Amino acid sequence: MVCLHALAPLPTALCAAAVLAFGSSAATAAGEVNVYSYREAKLIAPLFDAFTKETGIKVNIVSAGSGLEQRIKTEGANSPADILLTVDIARLQDAENAGITAPFQSAAIDKAVPAQYRDPNGHWIGISMRARVIYASKERVQQDAITYEELADPKWKGKICIRSGQHAYNNALFAAYIVHHGEEATEKWLAGVKANLAQKPSGGDREVARDILAGKCDIGLANTYYWALMHERDPSKRPWADATRVILPTFKDGGTHVNLSGVVLIKTAPNKENAGKLIEWLAGETAQHLYADTNFEYPILAGVKVNPTIAGYGTLKPDATPLVDIARKKKAAANLVDKVGFDN
Ligand SMILES: [Fe+2]
């Protein structure tokens, strides 16, 4: 497999020699593992450096903004990919549906990752969480608790900002709403939320805060880490964050909707054993600490502290709906968004 990385195609004999030479060097005695990632290489490099330091296993990263599942499919049996790192339950499920995943079962994962955050058959595994929350105007919104159901209340008429209803983050929340209340009630609710929008759905999650600062709306839906990124890492957007505060909404009969960043083991993985070690390591103490502080995500491993900025939002009470149930309602949610003309 190493030969796949060679600059020029090598004859088989030479290839074997190269592998031998590669394998015999002390530095690489533990071998390697190839990670395909939708997360930027420079963001995840420190994480994998720590893994290499602990295990001696070298990590090669291929990162891209899109198309990695297709690439793995096209590479077929020759794909060097061992694991795929991605965000959002929709993408994790897409990877499984693309037929590129292998089930990964391990006692360490069963212990570290609560059952609701992994595929029952092991085709995808959550390694951190983000919550879909409310950014609210500090000036104009007094209340500090809210339910998702309440977003359809006419008291918010003309006051809500949101990105496209078809975006994966909203899709997953709407799918969770279906799991809680059924399709009929969700359609009614979505129509109610749409009636409360200050403007056509647009932009991304950060723009919700921007538009609140500009006075275009009072509240909006966004993910937890964006607020922290604007506040801690992006001076140009810090005023957007400063105009808002984060409220952790809940379902009336549940908790706050969370989504995942996660990992899948690739069916054709040439370094399966090392891939397994890396997956277990990602759910372990060292990686979970790094993840929480580098990406402002909620650790999946119980007992690992959330970043202080994220902790400042209040105590997260995650909704109990298994992510696999949310994935099953993804299509129904997308259909309802179209049906009520949410984005029109
Ligand atoms: Fe995001």
Image: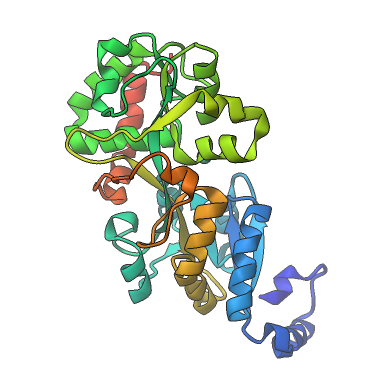
**Residue 80 appears in the rendering:** no
183 in relation to 90, above or below: above
| Above or below for 63 versus 253 | below
Q: Please tell me in which quadrant of the rendered image residue 90 appears.
A: top left
Q: Residue at x 74, y 88 (%)?
A: 25
Residue 34: x, y in percent?
61, 67
Give how far across and how far down residue 255 sits, in percent.
25, 41
Residue 319: image quadrant is top left
Residue 104 point in image, percent of width and height: 39, 69
Tell me residue 176's x, y (percent). 28, 38
Residue depicted at x 42% and y 32%: 246
Of residues 84 and 1, the one drawn nearer to the viewer in this rendering: 84
Name the foreground residue: 114 vs 263.
114
Q: Is residue 306 left or right of residue 214?
A: left
Q: How many marks?
A: 0
Residue positioned most to the right: 8
Residue closest to the eye, 84 or 78? 84
Q: Residue at x 64, y 62 (%)?
A: 46
The answer to whether residue 201 of the structure is visible from this angle is yes
Colour setting: rainbow
User: Which residue is at a point 58% across and 78% down the rendered structure image?
Assistant: 54
Quadrant where the N terminus is found in the figure: bottom right
Quadrant where the C terminus sits is: top left
